[in-house]
Image: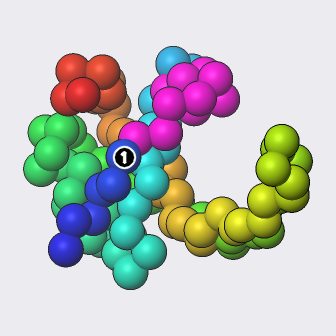
Amino acid sequence: MNVIIKPIVTEKMTAMSEKGNRYGFIVNRNANKEQIKKAIETLYTVEVESVNTIVQRGKDASRYTKSGLIRGNKNTFKKAIVQLKGDHTIDIFSNI
């Protein structure tokens, strides 16, 4: 099972990583905090202090186009906010 799906790169997460040494990742919905911690530590060779998880519920989405109204939905996903110990950092753009 792949635990880490992708990092979250937004203005808010960039500010959190610069100020608070916290990084965000989209993770597998079935992964628990221990699995996420081990995956981050092995993938980026850092020490993780804590892991907070959020399950973001999917929602309906619709948009108007030339051909009419298109309806769909956004999937449910799980986010993990990881706090690193000490002066450890993760260079997100090096693994892209």
Work out whether 1 lies above or below 67.
below
What residue is drawn where x is 60% and y is 71%?
76
Quarter of the C terminus within the rendering: top left
What residue is drawn where x is 50% and y is 50%?
81
Dividing the picture into quadrants, the one containing residue 85 is top left
Quarter of the N terminus within the rendering: bottom left
Residue 48 image point, x, y percent: 31, 48
Q: Is residue 15 left or right of residue 62?
A: left
Residue 19 image point, x, y percent: 57, 21
Residue type beneath disc 1 = Lys
Q: Residue furthest toward the bottom?
A: 30
Work out whether 31 lies above or below 72.
below
Residue highlighted by disc 1? 6
Please tell me which residue lies in front, 64 or 18: 64
The part of the chain drawn in magenta is 7-17
Residue 14 in magenta?
A: yes
Dividing the picture into quadrants, the one containing residue 58 is bottom right
What residue is drawn where x is 27% and y is 64%?
3
Residue 19 in magenta?
A: no
Please tell me which residue lies in front, 51 or 72: 72
